Amino acid sequence: MPEIMRAQGKELDVRVLDDAEFKEALRRKIIEEISELKDAKDGAEAMDKIAYLHEIADAMGEAYGFPRKEILELKDKTRAERGGFEKRLFLEGLARSATADGEKK
């Protein structure tokens, strides 16, 4: 982003963040982008935000020292254990269980 802004003739005051500052900046940025995704006006804007969220997530993985391959493997494992979102199921709550005599608790 600074390179683009400089190419537009803007003068910038930029510094390199240390590890803790960078992680915090990424946490703030992902929250900001999620908020902007929520307010997206159309599919193109939503897709742009989703792509940027992936970019931020990748940067977070790198900042924490997590190899991308391991993140993707864990994603697959988590999906296998907990399921994914393709069925669009929403858990409203737990059904009340019946006692041995059939009476609802």
Image (spheres, rainbow, N blue to C red):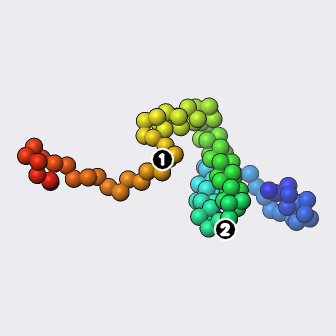
Q: Residue at x 92, y 65 (%)?
A: 9
* Vertical side of 86 occupied by 41: above or below: below
Secondary structure type for disc 1:
loop
At label 1, counting other C-alpha atoms closer than 10 Å, the crowd grade (few under 14, some 14-19, many 20 or more) is few
Q: Is residue 47 left or right of residue 13?
A: left
Q: Is residue 86 left or right of residue 14?
A: left
Label 2 or label 1, whichever lies nearer to me, is 1
Of residues 78 and 17, the one nearer the viewer is 78
Using the rendered image of the protein, determine whether residue 62 is visible from the camera's viewpoint: yes
User: Which of the 4 image quadrants contains residue 11?
Assistant: bottom right
At label 2, counting other C-alpha atoms closer than 10 Å, the crowd grade (few under 14, some 14-19, many 20 or more) is few
Quadrant where the N terminus sits is: bottom right
Distance of label 2 from label 1 (alpha carbons): 25 Å
- The amino acid type of the residue labelled 2 equals Lys
Residue furthest left in the image: 101
Residue pointed to by mark 2: 41
Residue pointed to by mark 1: 87
Lower sequence index among marks 2 and 1: 2
Q: Residue at x 38, y 53 (%)?
A: 91
> Do the CB atoms of the residues marked 2 and 1 lie less than 8 Å apart?
no
Secondary structure type for disc 2:
loop
* Residue 60 image offset from top left, x and y in percent: 62, 46
Q: Residue at x 49, y 43 (%)?
A: 84
Of residues 11 and 1, the one nearer the viewer is 1
